[in-house]
Amino acid sequence: MPVFVVFGCGVLFGLGLLISGMTQPAKILNFLDFAAIRIGRWDPTLLVVMAGALAVTFAGYVVAQRRSGPMMATKSFWPTRSDIDMPLVAGAVLFGIGWGLVGLCPGPALVNLVTASPKVFVFVAAMVVGMMLHDRVWTPWSYVRRYGLKRAGDDD
């Protein structure tokens, strides 16, 4: 049952991206082009979509925190860290640079795979390589640095 729920959430998210136009890189790039404000070409659509997403997320968190437990899991996993460290800042900067250069982030890029655009395939391939590099390089180093231990199965 949980696999179907996860799939349904993904489909709902994808539909939301399509309906709001957030799968169109030009919409994102036109939002990020603040110089276009003075000539009237700035597109505030992304701001409206983000505000709506924050409102829905806030309501969801309020409802989830009032429940005695999750509906489809044995326990809730709430964030325990609230500090801002260098990996968080570096990741945000890399994400922002990629988003600003291409107008895509992971969700819309996956939705855009159905367009069979070579540019989207290159973006998704680069994204997958980045994820693999992260898992191979950053994660083991992070475990050793933070906890002085290695993951199960890591070679010495």
Image: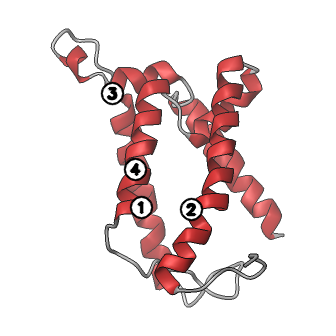
- Label 3 secondary element: helix
Mark-to-mark CA distance, 4 and 1: 8 Å
Q: Nearer the viewer, residue 142 or 53?
A: 142
The residue beneath circle 2 is 138
The extreme front residue here reads: 156
Which comes before the other along the chain, label 4 or label 1?
1
* Amino acid type of the residue tagged 3 in the rendering: Leu
- Label 4 secondary element: helix
The residue beneath circle 1 is 87
Q: Are marks 3 and 4 in contact (CB under 8 Å)?
A: no
Task: Using residue 11 as the reference point, say whether residue 103 is left or right of it.
Answer: left
Residue 89, image quadrant: bottom left
- Label 1 secondary element: helix
Mark-to-mark CA distance, 4 and 2: 15 Å
Task: Determine whether 127 is above or below 82 in the image.
Answer: above
The residue beneath circle 3 is 32
Q: Position of residue 99 (x, y in %)?
A: 45, 34
* Amino acid type of the residue tagged 2 in the rendering: Trp
Which comes before the other along the chain, label 1 or label 2?
1
Q: Nearer the viewer, residue 75 or 60?
A: 75
Which comes before the other along the chain, label 4 or label 2?
4
The residue beneath circle 4 is 92
Which comes before the other along the chain, label 3 or label 1?
3
Question: Label 3: few (<14), some or many (≥20) within 10 Å?
Answer: some
Task: Determine whether 135 is above or below 47 in the image.
Answer: below
The extreme top residue here reads: 39
